[in-house]
Structure formats: structure tokens, C-alpha cells
Amino acid sequence: MSNFKVFTNGIIKENPTFVMVLGTCPVLAITTTGFNGVGMGLATAFVLVLSNIIISILKNYIPDKVRIAVFITIIATCVSVVELLMKAYTPELYKSLGIFIPLIVVNCLVLGRAEAFAQKRGVWASALDGLGMGLGFTLALTLISIVREILGNGSIFGFPFLPAEADKILLFILPPGAFLTYGLLFAVMNALKRKANI
Amino acid sequence: MESTLKNMVLSLTLISMAMVAGLGFVYELTKDTIAKAEKQKEVSAVKDVLPSFDNNPIAEMKEIDGLTFYPAKKNGQSVGCAVKTFTNKAFSGRFDLMVGFLADGTIKTIVVLEQKETPGLGAKMTEPKFKNQFNGKNPAQFSLLVKKDGGKVDAISAATISSRAFCDGVQKAYDLYMKNFVHSTSGEAAKSDSTAVKGGTHE
């Protein structure tokens, strides 16, 4: 697989949210506003790239039987780094994402890429894989959160396009709206994919 | 790679140590910026909870018994005080509140600064439905206890411990505010004396 294919793999063909259905907890929980979606996606992408790089560098020094423990140690460190950086430079975003930033540790997408890709491949390919997967995740989160924000809050990235007194479909900001939006977008994605024969 | 006890212990130990070192480095790097961001949050909370004022409460802050007081004045007259208070009785240890009092001890607004309570239960104390019930109430008449304990506060359902802790934090702020700022308004000297003594016993 060429490097370019490794990169685009995560965005389209094996999109973590719409194809592999990995790490759906943050997908459903935090996609209430566009900013949350982008922020969570980029934080996860950062963790993916960093942990993929470290794991691919260390892959020859990790005994098979303890590899999961080592991966989790590395991933937890990366997540703590992201947490500290967000606390320092984007405190507002950190506050609105709350508990879901530390929970990236248990996002199976991150461990999944370590296990399926980074422990077998070189540093450069692993970094690209992490970036592709992270961007695919970010795009999916952004898409879902924009739909939910438009329908439930009448705004796009915080800019309201409806008057404040207009009726909005509050359901879409609430948890059931997450499932509805996710399911419907999933159907649209599958239809598009069938048409394009991917 | 083949796993033996020796290489498993060695690789886990070394990798954990390297990760801890890296994390420590980032912590040192971001420590000051985080402290500054938190201070910023406190300053904006002070403005949120106080009535209109024309002095600089941040410059006039006083620390008494671990609580921080930001007195607000208008034309030299005390109009109230923002108190950064805390409780150790919360479900997950400690949380910090910023309580705004008017000059007579009436609660104006409360802002939750930092909390780790359970999302969906205790964390509901950040929602207006719970914390706005204190607005405009004077703890002298409005007993700061949950209804179960004979007070007047509507507890969050299924989170009585967090609600009690919230009351505890507010009560502590109220008691110290009344003791150090309100009852001694007769003389400026007496007031600064009592705070000086209090400040001395702290730590």
C-alpha cells in the first residue's frame, strides 16, 4: 500500500465512524455543537498520530505478552499531554468537552490502530495512518455535530441563522438526536458509497 | 518479540519511566499557562457574581482561613463581596465555588469554579435549576441545609451528598464574610485588625 493510500484509507475507505464504527461513545456524546466536534476530533487525531509514532518506534522492544499494557501506557501519556495542552491553551473547549478528553484513553480506535497498524509498520506510514484516521474521525464528528447544531440550535459554529425565538428541534441536541443523526448519516454514506462503488 | 519474564519487566519498566519523564516535561512546560488560565477564570467569575462596583476587587483580595475574599465597593461604600470558597465534603472530595454576597449578606449569584462530581448526578449543581435557587436569598432566613436535613434547599435528586457539600461551601463563605466584613463596619481599624489576626493564623 502506498503512503498516499495509507493516508486516505482512514478518511474514506475505512473511516472510523462510518465504516469501522470504532470509538462511537464520543461520537454520540459530544457532537452537540460544531466546535465540540472539531475539537474532539482534532484532540483524538493528535493522540492517534503521537501514539502511532511512539509505538512504531518501540515496536521491536515490546514483548508480545505485555504489548497491550505497554500500548495503554503510551496512549495514556499522549492523552495526558493533550489534556495539559488543552487546559493551558484552550480552556473553554476543555471545559465543554469535559470528561471525554481523558476518556480518549479508552477509545478503541486508538488502541485498534496501535494493534492493527503501528506495531507492524514503519514510523512514517504509522504517522500517516494516524493522521488519516484522525482526520476521518474529525470529519465524521464535524458532519454529525453540524447537522445536530443546525437542527437543534439553529446555528452553525455558534453563529445563529435563526432568530432566538424561533422553534428549534431540541431533540437533536439531546442524546436521542445523536442516534438519529448518526443512523441517518450512516445510511446516506452507505448509499453514496454504493453509487461510487467503493 | 518472544516474551520472557526478564524482557517483559524490563520493557514495561523502561517504557513507563520514559513516558513519565515525557509527561513531567510537558507538565512543567504548561504549568504556568494553566495557572494563568485558571486565574483568568477566577477573575471573570468575580465579575459575574458581584453587583456593579468601581474599585478593583482583585487588587483588594484578602485570604482568610483558606477562603479568598474580593470586596466590591462603589463610591467608597461596600456593596458586597465575592468569596472563593470550597468544600471537602463532596462526593468526589473537593470542589470550588465563587459566591457573590451583597453588603447585607444576601447571596447574589453563585458560580461553580471547579468540580469533579458525577456527570448527570452531582454535576447538575452547575445547572441554573439548582444553583439559582440561592439567588437573592439571605442565609440568615434561608437556612442553608437540604430539605431532608430541615433546611430550605431543594437537593438535586439522587445527589444529596453533592447538594449538602454545596451548602457547606456557601455556609462557610457566609459565616466568614459576616464575621470579618459585615459586623465590623463600625470602624475601619477594627476591621483591618481582625483580618490581620485571621491572616496570621492562616497556614
Image: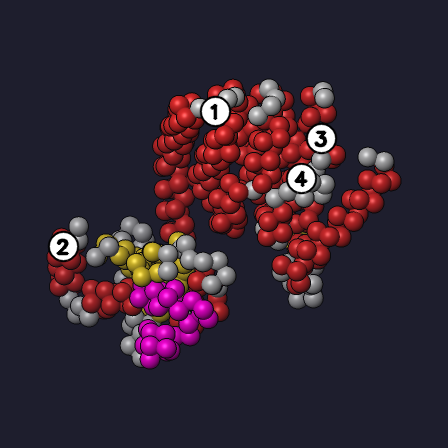
**Mark 4 vs mark 3, CA separation in Å:** 10 Å
Q: Is residue A72 left or right of residue B51?
A: right
Name the residue that disc number 3 marks: A9
Asked if residue B147 lies in the magenta stretch, the reply is yes
Chain ID at mark 2: B
Tell which tag, 3 or 1, sits nearer the viewer: 1
Callout 4 environment at 10 Å: few (<14), some (14 to 19), or many (20+)?
Answer: many
Q: Is residue B171 left or right of residue A8?
A: left
Name the residue that disc number 2 marks: B201
Same chain shared by disc 4 and disc 3 = yes
**Mark 4 vs mark 1, CA separation in Å:** 31 Å
**Mark 1 vs mark 2, CA separation in Å:** 59 Å
Tell which tag, 4 or 1, sits nearer the viewer: 1
Secondary structure of the residue carrying tag 3 is helix
Q: Which residue sits at x=48%, y=24%?
A: B3
Considering only vertical position in the picture, is B43 above or below B138?
above
**Mark 3 vs mark 1, CA separation in Å:** 32 Å
Residue A104 horizontal/vertical position (percent): 53, 42
Residue B3 is tagged as: 1
Label 3 near label 4: C-beta < 8 Å? no
The amino acid on which the numbered mark 4 sits, given as a three-letter code, is Pro
Same chain shared by disc 4 and disc 1 = no
Chain ID at mark 3: A
**Mark 2 vs mark 3, CA separation in Å:** 64 Å
Counting residues from the start of the chain, the first of labels 1 and 2 encountered is 1
First to last magenta residue range: B142-169
Residue B132 horizontal/vertical position (percent): 44, 69
Q: Judge by depth and name the residue closer to the eye, B76 or B24.
A: B24
Q: Which residue sits at x=20%, y=64%?
A: B180
Q: Which residue sits at x=28%, y=64%?
A: B173
